[in-house]
């Protein structure tokens, strides 16, 4: 009898020991923040890995032609591959995140391929090329941030006027927001328009230059405040820190149109004299963006009680003779 009890005890002990020494199966899945790609809009790629605590990891993901790595990440980029060396955390999980972006000219579905410790990454593999919705002289339009209701835009081909409707951006602090119409631009250019607000609440209309089309993009804009009809200059630098220059056009100064110009590393903002039609320089700002950049007209507001409708008249987007590109390519 005693030997039987001893045998049972040994078997139980052995069973318990087997459970504790078993290795958790390694799994890896890729997910995208959205299923379609558009020029200038960053997409988050997340590789979610589970396995045994402290297990070393070598992650290699191959980026499809037509897309490029965008922004900050903890990986190493070589050609069209990004790699990560890490280990699974004590909770049995490890996530690696990076961003990709396309520019004009990208075509077709984008197929990702990658491995973790030689094992194929599962989950989502394909980004579908989105269908652009051109409006007038612009390439596409989209929301920035997370509005309570998707915005929209329309173009009146008879009058050549643009109307942008947007909604409050949930959780937005600083940065760009609302709804924008945009075009990808290389080289120097100017963008001008008359800006009108249909319903005066906490928001307004703007024309501007964005480094890419996302809430926390560096940007340089000429903004019409719907409440007091002042024109403001706003800027975000490459570190994502929000700045306002504090420059405002006094309400006593008459103006008709607004214009923003990219000249190499420099941005310039003008307003036109309604009597003479001459352009008057309002401000200048050094810009440390990457190339290409995006010419935008847009709306934003900070009141969650309603939506805004912004009206843009006599809009002109003009390519200029290139000046020295300087830092436009240094900060990639």
Image (cartoon, helix red, strand yellow):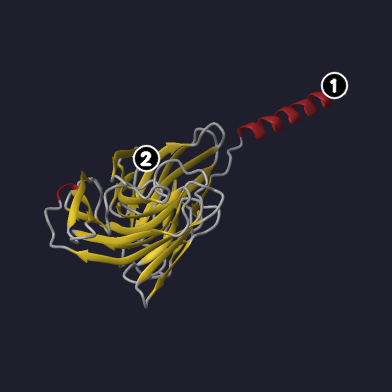
In the foreground, 310 or 4: 310
Q: Quadrant of residue 318?
A: bottom left
Please report the residue visible at 34 percent of the width from the left and 73 percent of the height from the top.
160
Residue drawn at x 30%, y 51% as measured from the top left: 222
Q: Is residue 115 visible?
A: no
Q: Position of residue 143 (x, y in %)?
A: 45, 57
Residue 53 numbered tag: none
Q: Nearer the viewer, residue 122 or 25?
A: 122
Q: Which mark is residue 2?
A: 1
Q: Nearer the viewer, mark 1 or mark 2?
A: 2
Residue 57 in which image quadrant: top left
* SS at mark 2 in the image: loop
Q: Is residue 272 above or below residue 128?
A: above
Residue 41 vs residue 87, the one in the foreground: 41
The image shows residue 163 at horizontal and vertical percentages of: 42, 65
Q: Position of residue 225 (x, y in %)?
A: 39, 49
Left or right: 69 in relation to 300: left
Instruction: Give the Cα separation between the discs numbered 1 and 2.
Output: 60 Å
Quadrant (top left/top right/bottom left/bottom right) for the N terminus: top right
Mark 2 lies on residue: 74
Q: Is residue 47 above or below residue 276?
A: above
Q: Residue 157's spot in the image, x, y percent?
A: 37, 76
Q: Residue at x 49, y 60 (%)?
A: 151
Q: Is residue 4 left or right of residue 204?
A: right
């Amino acid at each position: 009898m005693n030997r039987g009890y001893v045998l049972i005890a040994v078997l139980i002990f052995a069973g318990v020991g087997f459970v504790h020494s078993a290795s958790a199966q390694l799994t890896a899945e890729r997910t995208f923040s959205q299923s379609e790609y558009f020029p200038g809009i960053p997409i988050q790629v997340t590789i979610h890995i589970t396995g045994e605590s402290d297990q070393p990891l070598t992650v290699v993901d191959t980026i499809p032609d037509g897309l490029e790595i965008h922004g900050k990440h903890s990986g190493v980029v070589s050609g069209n591959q990004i790699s990560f060396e890490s280990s699974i955390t004590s909770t049995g999980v490890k996530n690696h995140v990076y961003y990709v972006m396309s520019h004009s000219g990208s075509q077709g579905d984008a197929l990702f391929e990658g491995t973790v410790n030689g094992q194929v990454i599962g989950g989502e593999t394909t980004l579908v090329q989105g269908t652009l919705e051109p409006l007038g002289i612009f390439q596409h339009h989209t929301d920035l941030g997370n509005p309570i209701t998707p915005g929209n835009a329309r173009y009146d081909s008879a009058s050549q006027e643009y109307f942008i409707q947007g909604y409050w951006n949930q959780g937005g602090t600083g940065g760009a927001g609302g709804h924008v119409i945009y075009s990808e631009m290389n080289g120097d250019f100017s963008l001008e328009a008359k800006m009108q607000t249909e319903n005066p609440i906490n928001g307004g209309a703007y024309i501007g230059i964005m480094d890419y089309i996302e809430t926390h993009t560096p940007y340089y804009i000429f903004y019409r405040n719907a409440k007091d009809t002042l024109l403001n200059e706003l800027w975000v630098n490459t570190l994502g820190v929000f700045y306002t220059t504090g420059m405002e056009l006094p309400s006593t100064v008459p103006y008709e149109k607004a214009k923003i110009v990219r000249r190499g590393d420099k941005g310039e903002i003008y307003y036109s004299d309604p009597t003479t039609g001459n352009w008057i320089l309002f401000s200048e700002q050094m810009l440390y963006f990457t190339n290409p950049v995006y010419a935008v007209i847009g709306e934003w507001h900070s009141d969650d009680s309603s939506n805004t409708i912004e009206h843009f008249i006599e809009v002109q987007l003009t390519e200029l003779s290139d000046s020295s590109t300087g830092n436009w390519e240094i900060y990639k």
